[in-house]
Image: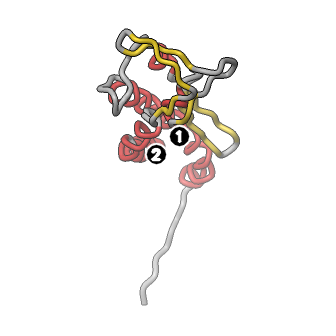
Amino acid sequence: MIGFRLQVDKEGLRRLQAAPDEMRKALIPAMKACMVAAEATAKKDYLSGPRPAKLQRVSGRLRGSIATEVRQDGNTVTGRIGSNVVYAHIHELGGVIRPKTATYLRFQIGGQWKSVKQVRMPARPFLRPALEDNMGRFREIFRRSLMEAFG
């Protein structure tokens, strides 16, 4: 006959009861570390060229606008990364740019002015691949954080 006995002392019981709170407390800094890593990857690997596959730094406005936030809502901890620059969306997802008030878009290429009715922008994502590139690192950050929280 095989059997086992589990005995939990008062301290062990207190730790088991506090586990959800301890886990939540551990997840918030871990999520912040993940968002910082993703932001650094986006800036270093995807907003520093070379064109045309990736975006290259022109003014630094898009690069400087990348922000992260971590929120806790009950038992849910959410990390977000994004930009408030208007053209971030078209670069991330691609799409068509059409004039809002005029008939044509006008811009200069090689010293010559061109007029077109629309421009198709290819997707040159910088946020999604930064998150994907860091997935293994995220797992390690969360694992280490939870191991530290529970000893």
Q: Nearer the viewer, residue 3 or 60?
A: 60
**Is 133 above or below relative to 114?**
below
Percent across and percent down for residue 133 are 36, 41
Residue 40 percent across, percent down from the top left: 39, 26
**Residue at image point 53% right, 15% down:** 106
Q: Residue at x 56, y 43 (%)?
A: 22
> In this view of the protein, which residue sits in the foreground, 71 or 121?
121
Near mark 2 (Cα within 10 A), the count class, few <14, some 14-19 or many ≥20, is some
Q: Say if mark 2 contacts mark 1, CB within 8 Å.
A: yes
Q: Position of residue 19 (x, y in %)?
A: 58, 49
Q: Amino acid at mark 2?
A: Leu
Question: Circle 2 — which element?
Answer: helix
Q: Is residue 127 above or below residue 136?
A: above
What amino acid type is highlighted by mark number 1?
Leu
Name the residue carrying label 2: 146
Task: Give the alpha-carbon distance from disc 2 to disc 1, as whole Å.
Answer: 7 Å
Q: Residue at x 55, y 57 (%)?
A: 9
Residue, disc 1:
27
In the image, residue 84 above or below residue 94: above
Q: Earlier in the sequence, mark 2 or mark 1?
A: 1
SS assignment at label 1? helix
In which quadrant is the N terminus drawn? Answer: bottom left
